[in-house]
Image (tube, rainbow, N blue to C red):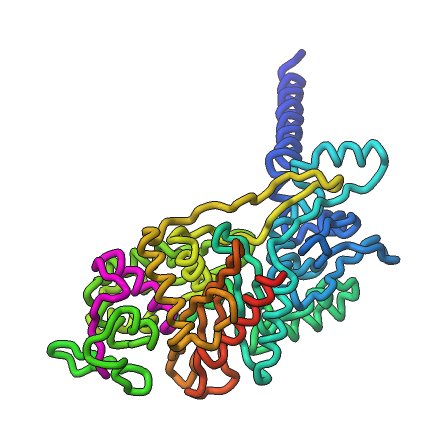
Amino acid sequence: MNTPIRRLAVACLVLFVALMGNATYVQYVQANDLNSKANNKRVIDDEYSRERGAILVGGEPVAESVPSDDQFTFQRTYPNGPLYAQVTGFFSYTYGRSAIENAENPLLSGSDNRLFVNRVVDLLANKQPKGGSVELTLDAAGQQAAATALAALPAGTKGSVVALDPTTGAVLTMYSQPTYDPNALASHDFAAVNQAWQALNDDPANPLLNRATQEIQPPGSTFKLVTASAALEQLDLNPGSVVQGGSELTFPGIEYTLPNAGGGSCGGDQITLEQALNVSCNVSFGSLATQIGQGALEEQAEKFGFGDKVIENLASNASRFTTPDTELELPQLAQSGIGQFEVAATPLQMAMVAAGIANDGVVMTPYVVDVVRDPSLRVLDDAGDGEEYSTALTPDHAAMMQQMMISTVQSGTASSARIPGLEVGGKTGTAQRGNGLPNLAWFASFATSGDQQVAVAVMIESAQATDDISGGRLAGPIAKTVMEALLAS
């Protein structure tokens, strides 16, 4: 073989090896990344031609695929779509997926590695692969109760409700108002889908936002549960310990004073910790915050979940005690102790605080996916009894917090949550945001009936800028309604 032919042969061999290497890299190494690209039309068309698995609540589908007479063979539908939209999310040809539809897409679409055998069987039988199913932790009665209660508020009111099982962390209720209909985004009429998407994104109320996990707002006096917990843990107090009362808290050398809501004195210059929680005394908890200190109070908040997104499968934002590297001055620390200044929390976070107290100080990690199954209904994954997130309180201190929250419902500001025959603990909150923005009404609570227990947090934003909003008046009755529905179901 002469030199030119040998060189040409080597060049062809190099090109052949490069071609094979590139094909191998694309088909094996890059396969998952290419398949998961949102704009991969081949994958999208393939997914839309499959029987996508159902999302279930109490054994009933809240998202399912039904036969269609168009090119895609199946249509994704959402019975009672707006009721579960923030958790199920949407499945759209044009705009992709969200929430559970996105987080559990490999299983629902049938491409999950755990369904390999199913795919082989379907291939041999010349059938399209089917997706597996996802059972959610939600309780239908609690979800409907939350939706009905929020809908009864004045038009334009925004808010959300979260209910947890304190012993497992299972999310029993998660509803956000306003909501949206995912059927409008799943339609195969793409012109109508575009119009619906534009309308949802142009809506100033932002119905696509899951306020339960994404909206962080000042929690107001519901944060006093965290401050009280820190006082028990760090200052060795108990419900009968005497704390500072009076009409205002002053700071040496600083003109600013921290008053109580309405200018009251909380019952005297010296009151017990339990009374301070019962009447939601700003002076008491502002003073306690300065004694506890920024570091210890922030650490207590983190034990309840502040600083962490805390939940998988759903879009969420971390609650915060303060912004990073902020050194709080005494007035700012006092404001933080009553859930103001830079403190901001999601309703899910405040439900975790109430749940951790109810569960003897043990905070469980919240979750919304209970069981996943393959198309033959074989269980692939089961959440079981959940996972522990942290220990926020000793059992003794948790019992003290439970006692004080129960007395706050029995004879304090949280009386709107009383349920005859049940043990209910709660804490109200009215948070100021300033800049002409409406105040927020909060309520964090728990209820026990026999061996059943639930924790509920409610956050309401008035449609109008007004001071006439309070957690006890607006949020408490909603928490009561949801707790009754959950404990009766």
- Disc count in the image? 0
Q: Quadrant of the N terminus?
A: top right
Is 178 placed above or below 124 here? below
Is 439 placed above or below 102 here? below
Between residue 272 and residue 81, name the one nearer to us. 272
Residue projecting furthest to the front: 421
**Residue at screen point 52% across, 57% down:** 450
Q: Does 235 appear in magenta?
A: yes
Residue projecting furthest to the right: 69
Q: Where residue 397 appears, x then y in whole percent?
A: 31, 56
Between residue 324 and residue 104, name the one nearer to us. 104
The image quadrant of residue 398 is: bottom left
Between residue 476 and residue 189, name the one nearer to us. 476
Q: Is residue 229 visible?
A: yes
Residue projecting furthest to the left: 253
Is 150 placed above or below 139 here? below
The image quadrant of residue 409 is: bottom left
**Residue at screen point 75% across, 39% down:** 376
Is 71 placed above or below 420 here? above
The image quadrant of residue 259 is: bottom left
In the displayed structure, does residue 424 sit left or right of residue 119?
left
**Residue at screen point 17% across, 79% down:** 250
Residue projecting furthest to the top: 1
Between residue 152 and residue 447, name the one nearer to us. 447
In the displayed structure, does residue 397 sit left or right of residue 176?
left
Q: Is residue 211 visible?
A: no
Q: Where residue 421 appears, x then y in whole percent?
A: 51, 67
Q: Where residue 489 appears, x then y in whole percent?
A: 63, 61
Q: Where residue 288 appears, x then y in whole percent?
A: 23, 68
Q: Does 420 appear in magenta?
A: no
Q: Which residues are magenta?
A: 220-248
